[in-house]
Image (cartoon, rainbow, N blue to C red):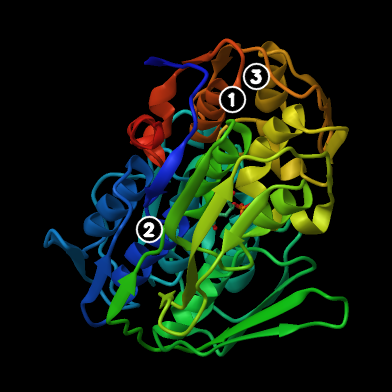
Amino acid sequence: MNARFDPSGPLRGSLRVPADKSISHRAALIGAMASEPVRVRNYLDAADTRSTLTAVQRLGAIVEDRGAELVIRGCGLRNAMTPTNPIDVGNAGTLMRLLPGWLAFQQGRSFTLDGDESIRRRPVDRIAVPLQQMGARIEAREGRYPPFTVHGAPLQGIEYELPVASAQVKSCVLLAGLLTDATTVSETVASRDHTERMLAAAGAPVERIRDERGGYRTTVGNADELELELVEVPGDLSSAAFLIAAGVLVRDSRLVLERVGVNWTRAGFLRIIERMGAVVLTDGEEPGSFQAGEPVADIDVRNAPIEGTTVEAEEVPLAIDELPLVALLGCFAEGETLVRGAQELRIKESDRIATVVDGLRGLGADIEALPDGFVVKGTGGLRGGRLDAHGDHRLALLGAVAGLASETGVEVVGMDAAEVSYPRFAEDVAELVT
Ligand code: S3P
């Protein structure tokens, strides 16, 4: 499905963005691993997180939709059931990389995971390596791609240093560590810590310390069982980021995005955009505004001139999914915008260095790809044209925002890709346009 986004009038008003995708995945998985029912409010209703609900149901969890909340009746840590067919993760990389952490200690049982065409291009060796060190056996196509099979076994604790800054890999190892004496993951730069926060809320012993190199060491100990009464999922900062960028770029805009998760390990984009000169105010973070151990705030954005900035490797994991928007903002900024140390972008739902650079260039941007990022020369605006989403939700949404701020509008080829995280983007924009 193609969709046109024409140059927009001011975006004004307040809105609640969709629920956080990362936290919704974790709520469903940890709910499935728990011994008592877990109530989940504001679970994201989108394709990726529906894949997670289906997956946990196939493993024996019961999911009741009570309208205002979901109730997940889990299997307990040790008792995942074996489905007869492969588990379909759809397009959800987070599901594909986190779920094996739980499956790896289902002794004597095997589980095959598969997904769509894009998932089949995304590597799983990054989780297979630590899980095999712990004692599980993983068989993957060509040694590193889905479909792949996890053969569960009793696991032993490990100390694992992440070779790439990835919250998905960290989370997988921490989940696998729940029945070990102690499992430690170290990372040289911080990545999102939603799993740690939710496991701690569910009663697992979790300790996170700063190490002497400025990185983090996170240790989980034997949890035996998990109990979590209620998770209230905050708004997704990564979805909010599209409206934040639109608010900054579209003349005379002023909007408030309500109750968005602003955990500092996710909020790198807010710091980057402020450095570029945008006025983005966040309130909240006071006691009582914590949901699922996560701080939430209202984000108040207004249109402003912006200037170029540099994003270095240590900031990359804190804004990984928002870096395409940094490229777009760079087109409108004064001076140069540089992102480096972001080679991880090449293995997202698409090669996001290639697709962002080609996509924005096709709209008139002066942008070059680097092996690990991109450099944009701001020209104060963007002409418009056609942008192919390449089946990548963040590309589709990037094209949509580019259209709103462009001179002639943007036709997004494959807008339906946005279904996995932000299905009602166009409706939300229509609500904000005065
Ligand atoms: C995610 C972590 C990030 C991010 C993805 C969601 C998560 O991936 O890009 O959209 O929920 O843990 P990596 O941790 O592999 O960079």
Residue tagged by mark 1?
Answer: 405
The disc label shown at residue 239, or none: none
Residue tagged by mark 2?
Answer: 110
Rounded to the nearest angstrom, the CA distance separating label 3 from label 1 is 15 Å
Q: Is mark 2 in CB contact (under 8 Å) with mark 1?
A: no
For the residue labelled by badge 3, is the local secondary structure a helix, a strand or a loop?
A: helix
Three-letter code, disc 3:
Gly
Q: Visible in this render: residue 6? A: yes
Screen quadrant of the N terminus = top left
Indicate the quadrant where residue 369 lies. Answer: top right
* For residue 173, above or below residue 239: below
* For residue 112, above or below residue 292: above
Indicate the quadrant where residue 249 lies. Answer: top right
Image coords of residue 251 (percent x, y): 59, 31
Numbered disc in front, either 3 or 2: 3
Three-letter code, disc 2:
Ser
Mark 2 CB within 8 Å of ligand 1? no
Indicate the quadrant where residue 202 lies. Answer: bottom left
Q: How crowded is mark 3: few (under 14 residues within 10 Å), some or many (20 or more)?
A: many
* For residue 381, above or below residue 147: above
* For residue 148, above or below residue 369: below
Q: How many labels does the image show?
A: 3
Horizontally, residue 419 falls left or right of residue 81, namely right
Q: Earlier in the sequence, mark 3 or mark 1?
A: 3
The disc label shown at residue 359, or none: 3
Name the residue at 54% across, 29% down: 401
Numbered disc in front, either 3 or 1: 1
Horizontally, residue 55 falls left or right of residue 256, namely left
